[in-house]
Image (cartoon, rainbow, N blue to C red):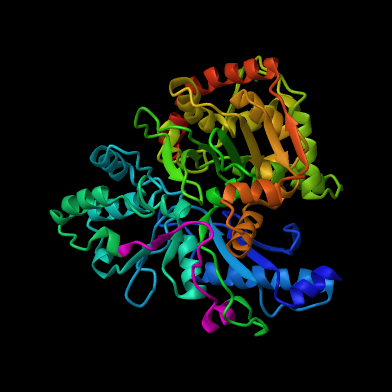
């Protein structure tokens, strides 16, 4: 009854996150725990060699997700919300959305999954003496300039998916600093983009005929706790087709899924980190000091409150596991058995831990798309084994789980081996960790460190976004990390798995084979263009 009253009185906070395969909304009341959720499943498409979602996909997904949320609220509490205390939008980080003077996309949205900006990434990294990954917005813009793409003449604004949706709902061109740091490098001394690097970029591209100052194209930068606009009448109509939702709701700065993952796992203090494992996988390690070198496999981004973060981002994680699960589901149906998808994953994941710890004689590659960490511009999912290697379900699934972290381990080795970056704790979240302890044990073996999972973190970045929305109106002069520790996670239920020495040794043996067997992946790409 108390939650119903809060919702009816417009005192709840809402976070919406547009992930790679699902748009999710999470509503929280004054206890800051998920009170209701909305879901809309979607999938990117490969069109003309570009991984993308259309403008219609985005708007229909928002409407569908919000309608799902309303149904859940109605079913649980018997009320229909007309307002919220605060809201926030999150989405998959990075990518390229170029808008013209009419705020229409000049070209289809290019997601983080695209790996066609290798030349731009290399040249900008050299120009800035700062790592610029392929998926960053500035790498996409520079590659477009190198390619002489005709849409450049009509560009008025650049943004990411989170910034685009925030603009549709509020009319404001802003980003949270964590998300902004994936568009263009941010400054270490002030809140905003690095002006020296911007000047270098403008000088370089002006010689190529591109005369628009890059800072004039980018959204304004805000830190967590700032006010970032209010829901417009047009935005309310877009989100809620029933017409019940009122305009005027306060919005916090939009953030990327990396930032909301850090919030949802309470990983904002130096020497802490989190791993988000779903369609893609990335590790975020909050640094206690700058790295000594520049690495093309390590991104330097920011927490939502502006702390420097080392990020290892890999394009591929669970998509190939999902494909195998679908096939096993199909087999079960052919055999006359009806198994829920969650049960299939549980069986396969638990079986994996019965497999041999080193997966000797087996190799799997989960590259559905390119993987910059290991130098691939495209991918061909595959599985191979030696003729004398017995094929069992346990071994097969273990190698599938191992390889989903293979590229991530390649990048993390730079932090742990070369930079000796300290990591006190890792918190995992995402679909990889849904089956109790299995994903934790695999990750603990990969990073040789304790891995924790929080109960509420299962709600993912949408819950993290809802917390950022709540923080904006409930911070009481506390820094974000203190607010999370004292008001959100003080009594959190946490499950922690310690690394097992045999598992660590087994994973390392697998990685030795993994590095060598990537030649098979190269041959597959060549043979299957």
Q: Position of residue 347 (x, y in %)?
A: 80, 37
> With 416 as the anchor, is 200 left or right in this view?
left
Q: Position of residue 442 (x, y in %)?
A: 67, 29
In the foreground, 292 or 91 = 292
In the foreground, 184 or 399 = 184
> With 525 as the anchor, is 430 left or right in this view?
right
Q: Is residue 84 above or below residue 487?
A: below
Q: Is residue 112 above or below residue 253?
A: above
- Residue 528's image quarter? top left
Please tell me which residue is depicted at 39% across the width and 49% down the height of the picture: 136
Count of number-bearing discs:
0
Q: Is residue 75 visible?
A: no
Please tell me which residue is depicted at 69% across the width and 73% down the height of the picture: 67
Position of the N terminus by quadrant: bottom right
Magenta stretch contains residue 218:
yes
Magenta stretch contains residue 33:
no
> With 455 as the anchor, is 477 left or right in this view?
left
Q: Which residues are magenta?
A: 217-238
Please tell me which residue is depicted at 52% across the width and 80% down the height of the picture: 232
Position of the C terminus by quadrant: top left
Q: Position of residue 467 (x, y in %)?
A: 64, 57
Q: Position of residue 260 (x, y in %)?
A: 58, 52
- Residue 89's image quarter? bottom right
Q: Is residue 111 above or below residue 132?
A: below
Give the residue furthest to the left: 207
Q: Is residue 98 visible?
A: yes
């Amino acid at each position: 009854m108390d939650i119903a009253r809060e919702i009816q009185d417009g005192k709840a906070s809402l976070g919406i996150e547009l992930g790679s395969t699902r748009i999710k909304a999470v509503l929280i009341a004054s206890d800051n725990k998920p009170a209701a959720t909305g879901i809309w499943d979607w999938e990117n498409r490969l069109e003309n060699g570009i991984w993308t979602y259309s403008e219609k996909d985005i708007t229909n997904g928002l409407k569908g997700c919000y309608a799902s949320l309303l149904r859940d609220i109605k079913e649980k509490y018997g009320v229909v919300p007309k307002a919220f205390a605060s809201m926030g939008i999150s989405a998959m980080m990075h990518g390229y959305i170029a808008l013209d003077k009419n705020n229409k996309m000049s070209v289809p949205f290019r997601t983080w999954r695209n790996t066609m900006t290798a030349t731009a990434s290399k040249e900008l990294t050299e120009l800035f003496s700062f790592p610029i990954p392929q998926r960053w917005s500035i790498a996409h813009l520079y590659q477009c300039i190198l390619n002489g793409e005709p849409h450049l003449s009509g560009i008025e604004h650049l943004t990411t998916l989170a910034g685009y949706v925030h603009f549709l709902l509020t009319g404001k061109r802003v980003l949270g600093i964590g998300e902004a740091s994936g568009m263009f490098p941010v400054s270490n001394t002030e809140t905003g983009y690095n002006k020296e690097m911007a000047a270098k970029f403008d000088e370089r591209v002006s010689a190529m005929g591109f005369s628009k100052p890059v800072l004039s194209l980018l959204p304004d930068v805000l830190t967590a706790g700032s006010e970032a606009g209010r829901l417009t009448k047009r935005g309310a109509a877009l989100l809620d087709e029933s017409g019940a939702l009122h305009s005027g709701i306060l919005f916090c700065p939009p953030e990327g899924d990396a930032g909301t993952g850090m919030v949802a796992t309470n990983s904002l203090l130096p020497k802490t980190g989190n791993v988000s494992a779903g369609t893609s996988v990335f590790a975020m390690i909050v640094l206690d000091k700058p790295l000594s070198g520049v690495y093309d496999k390590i991104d330097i981004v920011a927490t939502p409150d502006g702390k420097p973060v080392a990020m290892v981002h890999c394009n591929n994680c669970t998509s190939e596991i999902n494909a195998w699960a679908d096939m096993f589901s199909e087999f079960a149906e052919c055999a006359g058995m009806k198994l829920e998808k969650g049960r299939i994953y549980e069986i396969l994941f638990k079986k994996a831990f019965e497999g041999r710890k080193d997966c000797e004689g087996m190799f799997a590659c989960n590259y559905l798309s390119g993987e910059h960490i290991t130098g691939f511009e495209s991918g061909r999912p595959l599985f191979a084994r030696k003729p004398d290697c017995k094929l069992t379900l346990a071994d097969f699934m273990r190698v599938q789980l191992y390889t989903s972290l293979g590229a991530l381990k390649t990048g993390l080795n730079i932090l742990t081996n070369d930079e000796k970056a300290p990591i006190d704790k890792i918190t995992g979240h995402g679909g990889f960790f849904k089956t109790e302890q299995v994903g934790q044990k695999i990750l603990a073996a990969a990073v040789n460190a304790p891995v924790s999972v929080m109960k509420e973190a299962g709600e993912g970045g949408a819950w993290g976004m809802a917390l950022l929305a709540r923080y904006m109106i409930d911070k009481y002069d506390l820094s974000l990390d203190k607010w999370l520790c004292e008001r959100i996670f003080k009594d959190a239920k946490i499950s922690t798995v310690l690394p097992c020495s045999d598992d660590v040794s087994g994973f390392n043996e697998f990685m030795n084979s993994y590095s060598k067997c990537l030649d098979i992946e190269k041959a597959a790409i060549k043979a299957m263009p």
